[in-house]
Image (tube, rainbow, N blue to C red):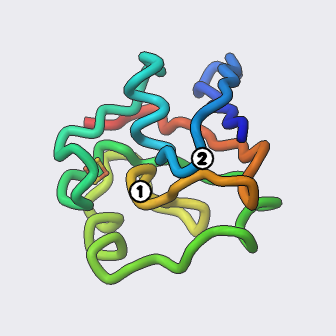
């Protein structure tokens, strides 16, 4: 599957990842600016905050309780498009997903 990250200035970075790679891991591995993943994917840091484009909202997993709590601790404003990148594994069902990287992450 492919993932596209859009930076606040509009720069797009697209990449193809292994099935099951999370939005956080793919970004950190590829050095995408603005996604930190400090806790390593435990839903404990909120530095993997992303805004998922609305057209993909219906294909996302439900927000878990831990994720919901951490989303209240994001540096950039939480919106109804906010998710923790580490809690979203990308497989064929999310192929082509596009996410916006927040202007502030830490
Ligand atoms: Fe820490 Fe996602 S990497 S909450």
Ligand 1 within 8 A of label 1's CB? yes
Q: Residue at x 35, y 65 (%)?
A: 71
- Give above or below for 52 relative to 32: below
Element marked by disc 2: loop
Residue 21 in the image: state x and y as whole percent: 50, 44
Tell me if 95 is positioned left or right of 33 in this view: right
Q: Nearer the viewer, mark 2 or mark 1?
A: 2
Quick one: 41 or 52, which is closer to the camera? 41
Residue 45 in the image: state x and y as whole percent: 20, 52
- Give above or below for 97 relative to 26: below
Which mark, residue 19? 2
Residue 90 in the image: state x and y as whole percent: 60, 51
Tell me if 93 is positioned left or right of 73 in this view: right
Which mark, residue 27? none
Q: Mark 2: few, some, or many residues within 10 Å (few <14, many ≥20)?
A: some
Residue on which the image places disc 1: 84
- Give above or below for 36 relative to 56: above
Residue that protrudes farthest toward the front in the picture: 18
Q: Residue at x 59, y 27 (%)?
A: 8
Quick one: 93 or 33, which is closer to the camera? 93
- Give above or below for 35 relative to 56: above
Instruction: State the image quarter where residue 34 is shown.
Output: top left
Q: Residue at x 40, y 23 (%)?
A: 29
Q: Residue at x 30, y 32 (%)?
A: 36
Tell me if 43 is positioned left or right of 3 in this view: left
Label 2 vs 1, first from the N-terminus = 2
Tell me if 89 is positioned left or right of 81 in this view: left
């Amino acid at each position: 599957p492919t993932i596209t990250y859009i930076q606040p200035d509009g720069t797009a970075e697209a990449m193809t990842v292994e099935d099951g790679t999370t939005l956080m891991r793919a970004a950190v591995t590829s050095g995408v600016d603005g996604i930190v993943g400090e806790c390593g994917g435990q839903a404990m840091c909120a530095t993997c905050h992303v805004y998922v484009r609305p057209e993909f909202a219906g294909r996302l997993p439900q927000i878990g309780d831990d994720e919901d709590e951490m989303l209240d601790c994001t540096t950039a404003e939480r919106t109804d498009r906010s998710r923790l990148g580490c809690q979203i594994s990308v497989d064929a069902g999310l192929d082509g997903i596009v996410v916006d990287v927040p202007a502030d992450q830490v």
